[in-house]
Amino acid sequence: NHGYIEVVVGPMYSGKSEELIRRLKRAKIAKQNIVVFKPHIDDRYSKKDVVSHSGDSIEAIPIEKASDIYNLIDEDVQVVGIDEVQFFDEEVVDIAIDLANKGVRVIAAGLDMDFKGEPFGPTPKLLAVAEFVDKIQAICSVCGQPATRSQRLIDGKPARYDDPIIQVGAVESYEARCRKCHVVK
Ligand code: ADP
Ligand code: ZN
């Protein structure tokens, strides 16, 4: 019996974590053996849980690198959840494939594009090898159309293409926006 790879992608606030949590909770209700991982760097709301913006949560293990997954699952694992998958190294793709080959249902959620609108980390590769892909939308905070991109704002103004990832002293925020309202100078 083989497993498979499911990927849930979209911009920030599209409900990726919500959808991941929903699928994992249903597997849990069915008494399946599940383990959930997230990158160590993502500490929005909670270090140990995957938390959606709407407040729903499920217990997760923060890991430094994708290969840590092997040390933290056992033979009888049936479902592996991975949130914020874009922050992992490319190896996460090989691990997802390997687990699926061994019979595990792998559910990964993450950003498909960075704030520039460019493919984000290992996500594009994962999308290519997945059996099931769901690309979900938020609501554009400018015009109300379906939002597919994450707008990065620095002190309330659209971030520039070359702006550093961490800007000391500046207030950084994000908004969900559509193609037309998404600005990268
Ligand atoms: P993601 O993991 O994709 O960032 P979450 O599951 O954490 O998404 O959050 C989705 C929730 O974010 C929605 O249910 C809603 O309550 C909230 N939200 C905030 N801003 C927006 C927006 N512009 N469009 C849609 N939902 C939004
Ligand atoms: Zn718009």
Image (cartoon, rainbow, N blue to C red):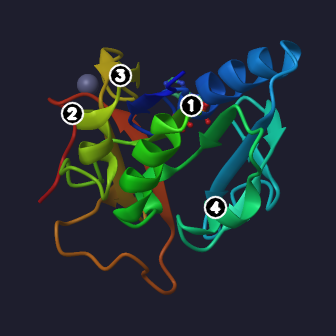
Q: Earlier in the sequence, mark 4 or mark 3?
A: 4
Which three-letter amino acid code belongs to the residue tagged 1? Gly
Q: Secondary structure at mark 4?
A: helix
Labels 4, 3: front one = 4
Q: Which mark is residue 131?
A: 3
Residue that badge 1 annotates: 103
Q: Position of residue 113 (x, y in %)?
A: 28, 46
Q: Nearer the viewer, residue 171 or 108?
A: 108
Q: Give the mark toward the camera: 3 or 2.
A: 3
Taking the spot 54% from the left edge, 35% from the top edge, the residue there is: 106
Instruction: Mark 4 or mark 2: name the one nearer the start of the chain.
Output: 4
Identify the amino acid type marked 3: Glu
Residue reaching furthest to the front: 1
Q: Is mark 2 within 8 Å of ligand 2?
A: yes
The residue at 11%/60% (across/down) is 185
Distance of label 4 from label 3 (alpha carbons): 22 Å
Which residue bears the numbered disc 2?
181
Give the percent coordinates (x, y) of residue 53. 67, 36
24 left or right of 174 in image = right
- Residue 150: x and y in percent read 35, 43
Residue identifier under label 4: 70
